[in-house]
Image (cartoon, rainbow, N blue to C red):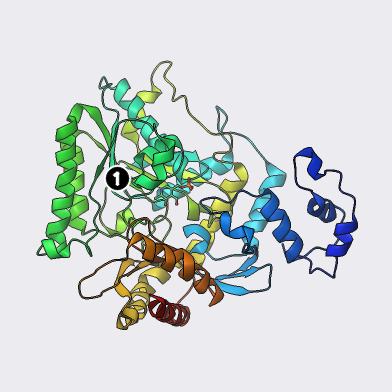
Amino acid sequence: MAIQKSKGLLGLIGKKKSKSSESDGRKDLKLFEAMRDGEAYGDKELQRSAKDHLWMHFTRHSPYQTKDMTIITRGEGHYLWDSKGNKVIDGLSGLFAVNAGHGHQELADAAARQMMELDYMPLWAYAHPRAIELAERLLSYAPKDLNRIFFTTGGGEAVETAWKIAKQYYKLKGKPTKTKVISRMTAYHGTSHGALSITGIAAMKAMFEPLVPATIRVPNTNWYRSKHLFKTEEEFGIWAANRIEEAILMEGADTVAAFYVEPIQNSGGCFTAHPSYFKRVREICDKYDVIFVADETITGYGRSGEMFASQRYGIEPDMMITAKAITSGTQPLGALFLKEKYFEPFTEGTTILPHGYTFAAHPVACAVALANLDIYDREKLVDNVRTNSPIFRKTLEKLYDLPIVGDVRGDGYFFAIELVKNQETRETFTKEESEKLLRGFLNSAFYEAGLYCRADDRGDPVVQLAPPLTIGPKEFDELEQILRKVLTEAWKRI
Ligand SMILES: Cc1ncc(COP(=O)(O)O)c(C=O)c1O
């Protein structure tokens, strides 16, 4: 939606008599009335209404007492525009989602066509053609042995679903005590109580305790912070995988249902792992009958340089979680892929999985996902990532000449830059310094310099980059220049 520029109409809206008033215990609703009546409005009116009525996710609201919000009004290709007329590069694909870039007419057309053919049906006992077609199409790209799909509306629901299926599966197989989940330190797997229990970020969990019991954390594969302890990354990977075996033995193999891992862990900043890590995890899961769940919410659909990162690293998951880029972010949809083995006990007698979502496999979302995959095939998006990823890495590595850049890591079109106080010693920032650096400066400075990305400190401070899969070397240079300018300025402020 392009907002209508205010033609001094704040006055006009101001004079309008709103049906609601503050005396209702609600701030006025004049903007909605103006929008409905086709009157012009601008940034000022949007700001006031957003501050009065929106509850932003994972966001501090205190700064909005004195500062404006950023209100994004339009997206096209790898660019975004805001309500003040600024244009920025979308360096995060929205939220690791808009892999094919913004504004595809054919996705809009697919949605409109589907709306007129079958606008809605749940997948509760009745199937519909788009879900059937999409399940097959998705499986045609998937790692071997995955044969069945449970649709959700996002990643967290698929995380939750995999756990519930695992618990019921083991009950049906006569192993009712296998209920626990092992996951990795600092990993993010979603916000519902189950998915949050699997998440490994203590600060996100504390206020929601008690959470679902029976989750256990093991080390992640943060090589940058471990390399002084091991000869090779492979040796470190085997060590980290062996901690999973240790945890299984400590808890008792008869109590552990699943191990969840992101092939490239986002939180903490793009932790990759040596393929030996995943091979050893597979061995351990086989040995103790533990379900290997690859959470590809971010890495799925080309981000790593293969359609799924499991294929890139030779991972053979029992279940695979995907979402986000399945529709390039344009419709809410998630898909949990499973081996047939986990479905088989549900085919007998009166057994059902008592679990589902009203909007999962929404026909419009499925139609859009199919059209999105057409774009992937036609524009060879995954090939583009595979070809250009080494150039992207090299371009970002130029930033090592800045003293604040400690590590550039990641794969595909998914990189993190870890910021440090001392490149030699890898000394990190204190909590207070990190707060000042990230929230006090970097996030807004990147945006003002023309780049939407994320500076985050769920682990050590990192800048996260995950642009649309459509870009190439020219845009890498643009990104590098913005990063250089802002990080140079950040160093001066430390
Ligand atoms: C690895 C991973 N799992 C799960 C989720 C949760 O997905 P959603 O926000 O779609 O529920 C995310 C979200 O970013 C994620 O990165």
342 or 28: nearer the eye?
28
404 or 215: nearer the eye?
404
440 or 486: nearer the eye?
440
Q: Is residue 1 above or below residue 334?
A: below
Q: Is mark 1 within 8 Å of ligand 1?
A: no
Residue at image point 36% right, 77% down: 396
The percent coordinates of residue 350 (x first, y second) are: 43, 16
The percent coordinates of residue 228 (x first, y second) are: 13, 65
Q: Is residue 191 visible?
A: yes
Residue identifier under label 1: 317
In the picture, the quarter occupied by the C terminus is bottom left
Q: Is residue 20 above or below residue 89?
A: above
Residue at image point 21% right, 59% down: 274
In the picture, measured across the screen, residue 66 lies left or right of residue 202, that is: right
In the picture, the quarter occupied by the N terminus is bottom right
Instruction: Return the residue found at the far top.
Output: 350
Corner quadrant of residue 213? top left
How many residues crowd around disc 1 within 10 Å: few (fewer than 14), some, or many (20 or more)?
Answer: many
Q: Is residue 468 visible?
A: no
289 or 373: nearer the eye?
289
The percent coordinates of residue 482 (x first, y second) are: 47, 79
Q: Is residue 309 above or below residue 392?
A: above
The percent coordinates of residue 163 (x first, y second) are: 36, 34
Report the number of discs: 1
Under tag 1, what secondary structure? loop
In the picture, measured across the screen, residue 35 lies left or right of residue 461, that is: right
Residue at image point 40% right, 34% down: 209
In the picture, measured across the screen, residue 255 lies left or right of residue 48, that is: left
Disc 1 residue type? Pro
Corner quadrant of residue 463? bottom left
